[in-house]
Amino acid sequence: MTQNDNLAKREIQMKKIEELIQYNQKLILERKRELEERKKENHFLEEVYNDYRKYYEDVVKEKKQQVQSLDNLHIYLDQLIKTKKMTEDEIQDAKKEQTIILNELNKIKKELDIL
């Protein structure tokens, strides 16, 4: 098996994991909303609802921290490129990393929009 084959399989596995995570996050959000409505009728659900709300808040906080970290990395790479203290190959690698970072930023921002 070639390195490209291994990378392709790994990429497919990562995509499946990401889709599963997104599915689970949506499911938890739906259950949180459902519990929010039902707790009005049944006060025993209040604690369960609070657990879901806490999880939701933690996920949003984590996503916002990821956005901030990726923004910082993007800015840092941009500054490195502008200083021109890198070889042409290093500059090209930095630009590729910036593209990856921007794609990840967009993905996380979309996830935040869903939440």
Image: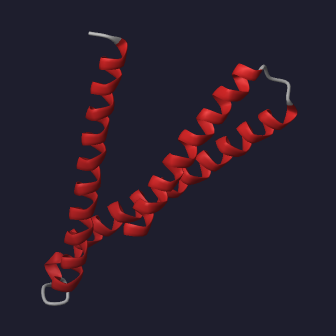
Determine whether, in the image, residue 6 is placed left or right of residue 57. left
Q: Can residue 115 be seen from the camera position used here?
A: no
Determine whether, in the image, residue 11 is placed left or right of residue 47. right
Query: In terms of image quadrants, where is residue 98?
Result: top right
Measured as percent of width and height from the top left, residue 13 is found at: 26, 33
The relative height of residue 31 versus residue 1 in the rendered view (above or below) is: below
Which residue is found at the position 54% from the left and 40% from the top? 100
Query: In terms of image quadrants, where is residue 77?
Result: top right
Which residue is found at the position 60% from the left and 34% from the top? 97
Q: Quadrant of the N terminus?
A: top left
Q: Quadrant of the C terminus?
A: bottom left
Which residue is found at the position 26% from the left and 49% from the top? 19
Measured as percent of width and height from the top left, residue 76 is found at: 73, 39
Q: Residue furthest bottom?
A: 41
**Front-lying residue, 93 or 115:** 93
The relative height of residue 43 versus residue 75 in the rendered view (above or below) is: below
Measured as percent of width and height from the top left, residue 58 is found at: 41, 58
Which residue is found at the position 32% from the left and 26% from the top? 8
Q: Can residue 37 be seen from the camera position used here?
A: yes
Q: How many marks?
A: 0
Query: In terms of image quadrants, where is residue 90?
Result: top right
